[in-house]
Structures are given as structure tokens and as C-alpha cells.
Image: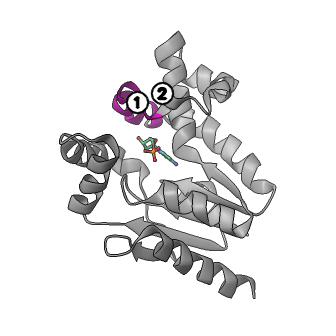
Amino acid sequence: MIVTIDGPAGAGKSTVARLLAERLGYRYLDTGAMYRAVTLHLLEHGGDAEAVAASGAWQSLADDPRLRGPEVNEAVSDVAGRPEVRRALRGVQRSFLRRGDAVAEGRDIGEVVWPEAELKVWLDADPAVRAARRMQEVGSERAGDAILERDRRDAVQTVRPDGSVVIDTGPLDVAEVVDRIAALVAARSA
Ligand code: DC
């Protein structure tokens, strides 16, 4: 089964998707990390965004700690906004998902990358809650403004798919969100 988890920054997608994949024994696909790796490659080596995305050279940076650093945060929305970059990365994402059982996390997975997913989840939370989470993560008061700015920049790519199960993660802790989605998976595979 393919489970897609989409939603805005700070809604809790990464933690939830990773734990859910572990719980189910499914593979985990973090598509934000792919856009981040292309961006880091461009910051390091320069070059043409479309060519870098298509070449796959960015894949060597998939586990680099700088993927979540301020330089990449600042530049990634522009890179992710380029249609040719999206086309290349969506191709890689689809080859991964074609191999079956996976939890895939991003902005456009349920709507564009894998519309035939058996379960589509949309995680959301109030902007104040999302900003507070980011502030805890990065220890900076500017995180609140940064979240709103990223919402604005990423809005075009962030699409709630029809038929998705919407979960407001504001009042829930991570374990509760994972439990809920795991229950939906169990119900759909019964
Ligand atoms: O989820 P994240 O913060 O790691 O995402 C990094 C960037 O990539 C962010 O600007 C949104 C963008 N992104 C996207 O456009 N499409 C995706 N499927 C995943 C991420």
C-alpha cells in the first residue's frame, strides 16, 4: 500500500511519516529532502538547476546535515518552484513508489505524484502551532515569521488532495497521529 502524507511546513509530516513507516515496516520517502539535496548541490557546485535535478548528482547529498541548514531553507522554495526540477524529481519519486509499500511525505504526493494512493493523509495545524514547533526545533524567534514566509512561497506546490483524510495535529501528540493513521491503514488493508 502507498500512504501519502502531505501538508504545510511544521505540521509534523516528517516525524509522523518516519515513525509510521517504521511501525508498518514500509519504506519511507522524504520528498522535501530531495528538493533540499538538489538545492544544496547547487549552492555547493553551482550549475543549472534543471540539469542537476535530472543528473541525479544530488543523490550523494541525501543524508547531509546541511540539508536542514539556513542556506538551504532560504533557497529551496525557488528551486522547488522550477517545473523542470519538479518533473525530474517526480520521476525519481514514482520509481521509488512503483516498488510498493511505502509512506511518502511532501506537498504534492497525493495530488500529483501518486494520485492512486490507497490512503492520502493531509496533516495541518494552526500557523501559530506550526511556528511554535519550528521555534522549538531551531531555537529562534524568527522561526514564526519564517513559517509564514515559507507558507507563502510553497503555497503553489502544497495541494490538499480530494479524498484525503485531514488531521489537525495541533491538539495531538506525535504518537496519537501515528496511531490514527496506522488504524486507517489497518482498516483499508483488511
Ligand atoms: O518539507 P520540507 O521542508 O523538507 O520541504 C523542503 C522544500 O521543498 C519546501 O520549500 C517545499 C518543497 N517541497 C515541494 O515543493 N514538494 C514536495 N513534494 C516536497 C517539498
Q: Is residue 57 left or right of residue 66?
A: right
Identify the residue at image location x=56%, y=70%. Answer: 120
- Give the percent coordinates (x, y) of residue 141: 18, 42
Name the amino acid type tagged 2.
Answer: Arg
The picture quadrant where one finds residue 139 is: top left
Name the amino acid type tagged 1.
Answer: Gly
Determine whether the residue tagged by mark 1 lies in a helix, strand or loop.
loop
Locate the N terminus by quadrant.
Answer: bottom right
In the image, which residues are magenta?
A: 68-80
User: Which residue carries the number 2 mark?
Assistant: 66
Identify the residue at image location x=38%, y=75%. Answer: 172
Q: How is the image coloured?
A: one colour
- Give the percent coordinates (x, y) of residue 98: 78, 55
Dominant secondary structure (helix, strand or loop) of the stretch shown in magenta: helix
At label 1, counting other C-alpha atoms closer than 10 Å, the crowd grade (few under 14, some 14-19, many 20 or more) is few
Residues at circles 1 and 2 in contact by the CB criterion of under 8 Å: yes
